[in-house]
Image: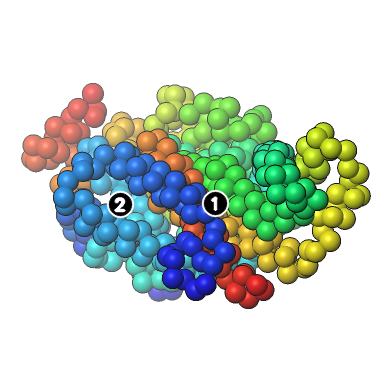
């Protein structure tokens, strides 16, 4: 891997995606360097979640390039793609926990399939991950027996299970109380500091994003309308950008 | 007589299959119309034809992906055992009950007819042959397509709309291997075993019903019943249920995996899984009976 790709784990170039003829992404270009957290802002239905799903090829792009950890994922076969996916932790909007498995089994699921460790080590690792998100007392509960916020925390523990290099968060704070939202924000900062993780966080929470992100991008009409830190966005001469950031900052 | 009398009626006639086929076909069409809310206009058949071709095309792609996933290691043995329990053990009471009811009804209905023709002594053989050769396998197929088909369609549909299947792919686990291959294989393995249970309960309850009308020992009943039975009468009809299992597993997993449209979509997937798998089980039965008669006559 060249030093350029090692330093830029996520590189998106001229990405296009449409559903039933309706353009959702219309030439998105974005790079995330190692250790950087980028917050993707935008209106509901603006293609933010689609962008994340394209990065892990849960959706396939119409055109454009997506390089993850130096590999062009649009051209990979199933096995190569899965090797790339192991480097990515994905937190879904509604956590997407497996409802027939307990909290402990949910977090153990990726470990049992990909990590070469004994059962005892696996159990210890699962408990560590759940302790990090404050869920180590509900190991035997099913997802239906815990609240939406708790599910989100378990989802975060599962996303971190394989020690990913890249984290993708879809609506990180949705369903979380302010204290837990702040705790997970701190966790992202800590992980970034400790392991130089790269992350893309899709969010509506402009103030929250200011606290943990290095850069914000505003997705509008299928393209990146503006990027920079909150102050730069607030000074934007674009009416939509100023209005969006202005409302979000109140 | 060759196939001169139509698709369903060969020389030996299988009216049971024909009536069931027509009934399910009517249910399937009316169900599809009702759920898709397609107004009945003259343009309807063309749209339906395209939908049918699309459905079979997508099913073909689904089968190829499933086959590839099932062949390549690692294999999900733990999940396979769990699905065998879910599909096999948990369907057992219902299948046994249905088999038992069939045995009783068969005994009650047939006794009267055989008495009229002075052939009462054939009753054990009629019950045993009817149950083993046709009633046991088809009843098991239809019961399992109802219970398991709806379950698989709803479960996978719900996993699809709540992004659990996406989460599995994001964890670098192939859902075709973990969710689909295990369920299809469990259906294939469990159907013959459930059929044996249905056969056993049907014959046993047939004897009970017969004994209530006219005392006969179990030993004598079984001896009369199985006297002329060959392995070729028993093995092919029992093993044909592996095809029923394949159909139930494939169709319901396919319907579940292609679910769209929230909870309403989950309901549609559960319904269509039952309707389509029952329909294809009955159609496959007609073909397989003909094939078995040709090969083992």
The front one of B94 and B172 is B94
- Against B215, residue A166 (above or below) is below
Residue A190: x and y in percent read 50, 42
Residue closer to the observer: B210 or A147: B210
Q: Quadrant of residue A7?
A: bottom left
Q: Are marks 1 and 2 on the same chain?
A: no
Residue located 30% across and 43% down the image: B33
Under circle 2, the secondary element is helix
Q: Residues within 10 Å of mark 2 (few under 14, many from 20)?
A: many
Dot 2 falls on which chain? Answer: A
| B88 is higher (above) or lower (below) than B214 | below
Quarter of the picture containing the C terminus of chain B is: bottom right
Which residue is depicted at the point 87% across and 55% down?
Answer: B223
Percent across and percent down for residue B35 are 33, 39
Q: Is residue A27 left or right of residue B72?
A: left
Q: Residue at x 70, y 40 (%)?
A: B112
The residue identified by callout 2 is: A51
Q: Is residue B229 above or below residue B135?
A: below
Q: Position of residue A53 (x, y in %)?
A: 36, 52
**Secondary structure category for the residue under label 1:** helix
Q: Which residue is mark 1?
A: B16
Question: In the depicted view, which residue is nearer to us: A233 or B35?
Answer: B35
- Residue at (73%, 44%) from the top-left corner? B115
CA–CA distance in space, label 1 to label 2: 55 Å
């Amino acid at each position: 891997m060249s030093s350029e790709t090692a330093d830029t784990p996520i590189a998106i170039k001229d990405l296009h995606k449409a559903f039933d003829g309706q353009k959702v992404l219309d030439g998105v270009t974005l790079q995330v360097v190692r250790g950087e957290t980028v917050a993707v802002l935008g209106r509901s239905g603006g293609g933010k979640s689609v962008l994340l799903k394209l990065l892990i090829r849960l959706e396939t792009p119409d055109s454009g390039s997506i390089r993850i950890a130096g590999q062009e994922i649009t051209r990979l076969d199933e096995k190569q793609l899965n090797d790339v996916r192991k480097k990515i932790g994905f937190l879904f909007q509604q956590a997407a926990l497996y409802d027939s498995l307990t909290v402990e089994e949910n977090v153990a699921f990726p470990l049992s399939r990909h990590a070469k460790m004994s059962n005892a080590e696996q159990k210890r690792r699962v408990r560590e991950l759940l302790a990090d998100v404050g869920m180590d007392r509900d190991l035997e509960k099913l997802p239906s027996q815990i609240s939406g916020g708790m599910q989100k925390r378990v989802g975060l523990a599962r996303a971190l299970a394989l020690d990913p290099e890249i984290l993708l968060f879809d609506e990180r704070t949705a369903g979380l109380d302010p204290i837990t939202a702040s705790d997970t924000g701190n966790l992202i900062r800590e992980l970034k500091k400790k392991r130089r993780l790269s992350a893309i966080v899709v969010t509506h929470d402009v103030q929250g994003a200011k606290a943990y992100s290095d850069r914000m991008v505003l997705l509008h009409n299928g393209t990146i309308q503006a990027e920079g830190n909150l102050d730069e966005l607030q000074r934007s001469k674009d009416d939509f950008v100023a209005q969006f950031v202005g409302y979000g900052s109140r | 007589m060759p196939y001169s009398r139509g698709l369903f009626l060969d020389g030996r006639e299988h009216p049971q299959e024909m009536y069931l086929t027509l009934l399910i076909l009517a249910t399937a069409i009316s169900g599809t119309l009702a759920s898709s809310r397609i107004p009945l206009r003259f343009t309807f058949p063309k749209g339906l034809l395209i939908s049918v071709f699309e459905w079979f095309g997508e099913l073909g792609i689904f089968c190829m992906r499933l086959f590839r996933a099932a062949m390549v290691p690692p294999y999900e043995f733990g999940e396979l055992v769990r699905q065998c329990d879910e599909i096999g053990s948990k369907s057992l009471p219902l299948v046994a009950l249905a088999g038992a009811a069939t045995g009783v009804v068969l005994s009650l209905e047939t006794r009267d007819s055989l008495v009229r023709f002075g052939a009462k002594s054939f009753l054990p053989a009629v019950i045993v042959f009817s149950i083993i050769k046709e009633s046991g396998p088809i009843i098991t197929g239809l019961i399992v397509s109802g219970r398991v088909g709806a379950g698989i369609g709803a479960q996978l549909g719900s996993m699809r709309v709540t992004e659990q299947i996406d989460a599995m792919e994001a964890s670098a686990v192939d859902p075709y291997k973990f969710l689909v291959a295990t369920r299809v294989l469990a259906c294939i393995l469990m159907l013959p075993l459930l059929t044996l249970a249905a056969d056993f309960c049907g014959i046993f309850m047939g004897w009970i019903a017969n004994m209530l009308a006219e005392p006969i020992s179990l030993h004598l009943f079984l001896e009369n019943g199985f006297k002329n039975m060959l392995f070729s009468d028993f093995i092919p009809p029992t093993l044909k249920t592996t095809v029923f299992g394949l159909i139930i597993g494939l169709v319901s997993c396919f319907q579940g995996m292609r679910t769209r449209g929230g909870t309403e979509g989950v309901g549609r997937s559960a319904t269509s899984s039952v309707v389509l798998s029952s329909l294809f089980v009955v159609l496959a039965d007609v073909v397989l009976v003909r094939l078995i008669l040709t090969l083992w006559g």
